[in-house]
């Protein structure tokens, strides 16, 4: 984003393990933004982005998103380690209820969502996302994995969807 002269339009802070705290932090960033916001999230971040986009009438880009996080993450209650920072944290039972509370059963404005999924996602079933985001612009790619291996090839499409390029 810096290389494109768009660094001032980008925020990617470390979210806390608590879903309520993560949403509150993201909402503070949304409120402070001087220009229209597009939320982008991968995996659990896609679940959060869906909630934020629906609640605040924003555009959302979802990359291999969690669809029913309160169900798929229930088995991870207990001590965990952040895959990126190595930091230890506790995934608490009340986080499951917090995830359930922000679930969006059905998107109301499919045109405001871009879904990017790879069929080789070893963590989440991409087909659940295809069904949940029916009517949204969808890119379904064969192969890949949960990390969305072709991010670089789709960055321009994400920026265009967000209205940051022509």
Image (cartoon, rainbow, N blue to C red):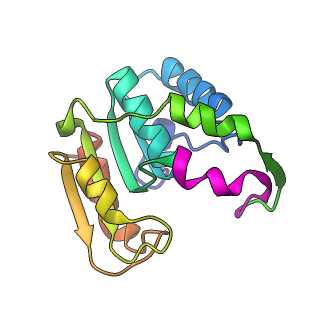
Residue 81 visible: yes
Q: Residue furthest top?
A: 31
- Where on the picture, by quarter, is residue 156? bottom left
Q: Which residue is at a point 31% across and 49% down the rendered structure image?
A: 159
Give the x, y percent position of residue 78. Answer: 80, 52
Residue 40 magenta-highlighted: no
From this view, report whether residue 26 is shown above or below residue 6. above
Magenta region: which residues? 70-84
Q: Which residue is at a point 37% across and 73% down the rendered structure image?
A: 150
Residue 6 visible: no
Q: Residue furthest bottom?
A: 143
Give the x, y percent position of residue 160. Answer: 24, 48
- Where on the picture, by quarter, is residue 59? top left
From this view, report whether residue 147 is shown above or below residue 72. below
| In the foreground, 4 or 82 | 82
Give the x, y percent position of residue 46. Answer: 45, 47
Residue 78 magenta-highlighted: yes
**Drawn side of residue 44 relative to residue 103, left or right:** right
């Amino acid at each position: 984003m810096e290389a494109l002269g768009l660094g001032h339009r980008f925020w990617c802070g470390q979210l806390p393990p608590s879903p309520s705290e993560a949403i509150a932090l993201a909402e503070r960033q949304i409120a402070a933004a001087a220009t229209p916001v597009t939320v982008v999230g991968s995996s659990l971040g896609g679940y959060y982005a869906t909630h934020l986009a629906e609640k605040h009438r924003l555009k959302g880009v979802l990359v291999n998103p969690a669809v029913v996080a309160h169900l798929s993450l229930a088995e991870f209650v207990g001590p965990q380690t952040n895959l990126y920072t190595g930091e230890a944290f506790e995934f608490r039972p009340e986080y499951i209820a917090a995830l359930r509370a922000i679930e969006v059963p059905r998107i109301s404005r499919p045109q405001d969502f871009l879904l990017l999924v790879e069929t080789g996602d070893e963590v989440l079933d991409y087909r659940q996302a295809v069904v949940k985001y029916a009517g949204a612009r969808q890119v379904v790619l064969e192969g890949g994995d949960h990390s969305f291996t072709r991010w670089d090839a789709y960055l321009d499409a994400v920026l265009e969807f967000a209205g940051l390029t022509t």
